[in-house]
Amino acid sequence: MNTGDTQKPPPDSRGRSAGEVRRTTVPREHRETVGEVRVENPRIRCTDVNVWYGETHAVHNISIDVGHNEILALIGPSGCGKTTFLRCMNRMNDTIAGCRVEGEILVDGANVNGPEIDVVPLRARMGMVFQKPNPFPKSIFENVAFGPRIHGLTANQLELEEIVVTSLQKAGLWEEVKDRLEEPGTGLSGGQQQRLCIARAIAVQPEVILMDEPCSALDPIATATIENLMVDLSQNYSICIVTHSMQQAARVSQRTAFFHLGDLIEVGETSELFIRPGHQLTEDYITGRFG
Ligand SMILES: Nc1ncnc2c1ncn2[C@@H]1O[C@H](COP(=O)(O)OP(=O)(O)OP(=O)(O)O)[C@@H](O)[C@H]1O
Ligand SMILES: [Mg+2]
């Protein structure tokens, strides 16, 4: 019988009263993830991560590890929470008003949400590459030199120049720009700009590189260059990449995580997950029935 109380949401799973967490809908059950979310000796360990934008519960109880020297692909239909989850790892969601993150994210055992964590060095340790290349309005040299300089990573100009050269080399861009380092970064092609952004991320000696659809604005040749680069970089870094291309996930990643409506539905070895998905939703998505 309707008691007249139905307009108030019920207490949530953590026992908070309706006044503390207001929702537009009654929270549904979290769907358990199929597959092994943990790896031995993880670089990143996420446990019960939840994200809200105001009253919208965008990411539900996600637990997953990222291994050392691993490329983990995050896939799933538009709006399922891939970017939101990726942005939790280096606290980029802090920059969004009304966004609230709960849960534990450990990087090399340290909680990124801990009170002692300074987000500026954290974001340097966990570099991010976005869908649209976003070089600074500065020279190619300065785009790469900026981070090491502000983080005080070099003692003198010579060391700074060395970092710029090696970062551009690792990003596979050096040969194309070595004679035009003083020209603006924004004057490069899209694929070159994306490699410049990767060089910029590498220059501050990160441990993890977070990539949000880094190739979606690139042609197949530039995409292949970036994919080869990711595989090379994974010898030194852990990489977490959001992609809408299942072929790309299959080409570069060792493990794949499939998201759906804010839940992590399935995690597995990429080769296994694409051939023998363990959940109907994963199968429907990878066979193109929705998405
Ligand atoms: N800044 C924001 N403010 C409010 N809601 C947001 C914001 N960013 C994302 N959302 C909502 O959170 C949910 C997850 O969005 P998110 O961008 O993480 O999805 P996604 O999987 O990355 O999608 P896409 O593949 O389209 O990039 C969506 O419902 C989206 O509308
Ligand atoms: Mg996204």
Image (cartoon, grey):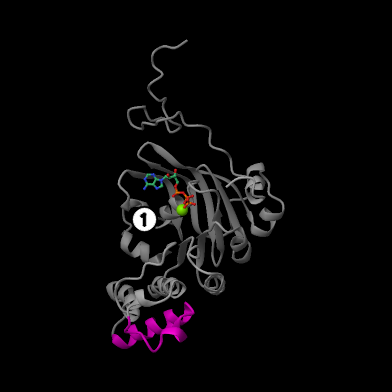
The main secondary structure of the magenta stretch is: helix
| Whether residue 106 is situated above or below residue 24 in the rendered picture | below
Asked whether 273 or 108 is in front, the reply is: 273
Q: Which residues are magenta?
A: 157-183
Decide whether residue 108 is among the magenta residues.
no
What secondary structure is found at the residue carrying circle 1?
Answer: helix
Q: Residue at x 40, y 66 (%)?
A: 125
Residue 260 placed where, x, y %?
Answer: 55, 44
Residue at the right extreme, as displayed: 276
Count of residue discs: 1
Residue 21 placed where, x, y %?
Answer: 36, 32
| Whether residue 265 is situated above or below residue 67 in the rendered picture | above
Q: Residue at x 56, y 58 (%)?
A: 73
Q: Residue at x 43, y 33 (%)?
A: 14
Q: Could you say which quadrant of the image residue 71 lies in? A: bottom right
Q: Residue at x 46, y 80 (%)?
A: 173
Q: Could you say which quadrant of the image residue 168 lies in? A: bottom left
Q: Bin the neighbour count of mark 1 within 10 Å (Cα to Cα): few under 14, some 14-19, many 20 and up.
A: some
- Taking the image as shown, residue 59 lies to the left or right of residue 254, namely left
| Whether residue 212 is situated above or below residue 224 in the rendered picture | above
Residue 61 placed where, x, y %?
Answer: 49, 42
Decide whether residue 173 is among the magenta residues.
yes
Provide the residue designation for mark 1.
Answer: 92
- Taking the image as shown, residue 211 lies to the left or right of residue 142, namely right
Asked whether 24 or 132 is in front, the reply is: 132
| Whether residue 36 is situated above or below residue 190 in the rendered picture | above
Residue 8 placed where, x, y %?
Answer: 37, 22
Name the kind of residue labelled 1 in the image.
Met
The answer to whether the beta carbon of the residue marked 1 is less than 8 Å from any atom of ligand 1 is no
